[in-house]
Image (spheres, rainbow, N blue to C red):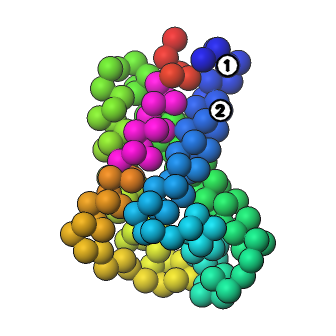
């Protein structure tokens, strides 16, 4: 990848957009639902159950919300530990650790505070699959942090 004039911004944008987009695919694979339905569920965090009866507008809102959250999650990582991660070969460990944090914050803080107002009750397999998805999410952010900030 060519060197950016704004490596911190590049790490946030690449990490956030790639991780956020792939997360929709992971959620689709885990749940068996079409990605459009997943995006409506994401929109439901703001709109509640009504989002599921909606159409492409709700799905587009879900994608925008997904990207906004993903960019925020990436920005927190890059701004707090980005330089440290870029200076070490342990970036995968940093990413996985951040994935664990993301998993717990999203499931036990964000979801209960959203319009869904619920804490997930995951089966063991569901817990493992969703945690694995967040490990990947954190790993992707750490990967782009390392690639964009290492110099």
Camera sees residue 72: no
Q: Is residue 112 visible?
A: yes
- Give percent across and percent down for residue 111: 47, 74
> How far is disc 1 from disc 2 in space, using C-alphas?
9 Å
Mark 1 is surrounded, within 10 Å at the Cα level, by few (under 14), some (14 to 19) or many (20 or more) other residues, namely: few
Q: Give yes or no for contact between labels 1 and 2 (Cβ–Cβ under 8 Å).
A: yes
Could you tell me which quadrant the N terminus lies in?
top right
Q: Is residue 78 left or right of residue 62?
A: left
Compare residues 72 and 44 and report the one nearer the observer: 44
Please state the horizontal and vertical placement of residue 145, each as a whole percent of the image: 50, 30
| Residue 66 figure quarter | bottom right
- The x and y percentages for residue 62 are 66, 66
**Residue 18, image quadrant:** top right
Name which residue lies at 58% across and 64% down: 35
State the residue position of label 2: 9
| Residue at numbered disc 1 | 4
Q: Is residue 75 left or right of residue 128?
A: right
Across and down, in percent, residue 52 comes to 63, 82
> Which comes sooner in the sequence, label 1 or label 2?
1
Q: Bin the neighbour count of mark 2 within 10 Å (Cα to Cα): few under 14, some 14-19, many 20 and up.
A: some
Extent of the magenta region: 135-146
**Extreme residue toward the top, this view:** 151
User: Seen from this angle, which residue lies furthest right?
Assistant: 57
Question: What type of secondary structure mainly makes up the magenta span?
Answer: helix
Say which residue appears at 45% left-offset and 79% top-offset. 112
Q: Secondary structure at mark 1?
A: loop
The magenta stretch spans residue 144:
yes
């Amino acid at each position: 990848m060519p060197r950016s004039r704004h490596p911190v911004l590049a790490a946030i944008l690449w990490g956030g957009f790639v991780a956020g987009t792939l997360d929709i695919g992971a959620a689709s694979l885990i749940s068996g639902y079409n990605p459009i339905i997943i995006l409506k569920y994401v929109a439901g965090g703001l709109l509640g159950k009504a989002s599921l009866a909606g159409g492409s507008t709700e799905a587009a809102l879900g994608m925008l919300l997904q990207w906004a959250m993903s960019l925020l999650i990436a920005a927190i990582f890059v701004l707090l530990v980005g330089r440290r991660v870029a200076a070490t070969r342990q970036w995968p460990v940093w990413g996985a650790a951040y994935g664990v944090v993301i998993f717990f914050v999203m499931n036990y803080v964000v979801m209960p505070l959203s319009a869904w107002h619920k804490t997930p009750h995951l089966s063991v397999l569901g817990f493992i699959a969703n945690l694995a998805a967040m490990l990947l999410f954190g790993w992707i952010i750490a990967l782009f942090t390392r690639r964009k900030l290492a110099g």
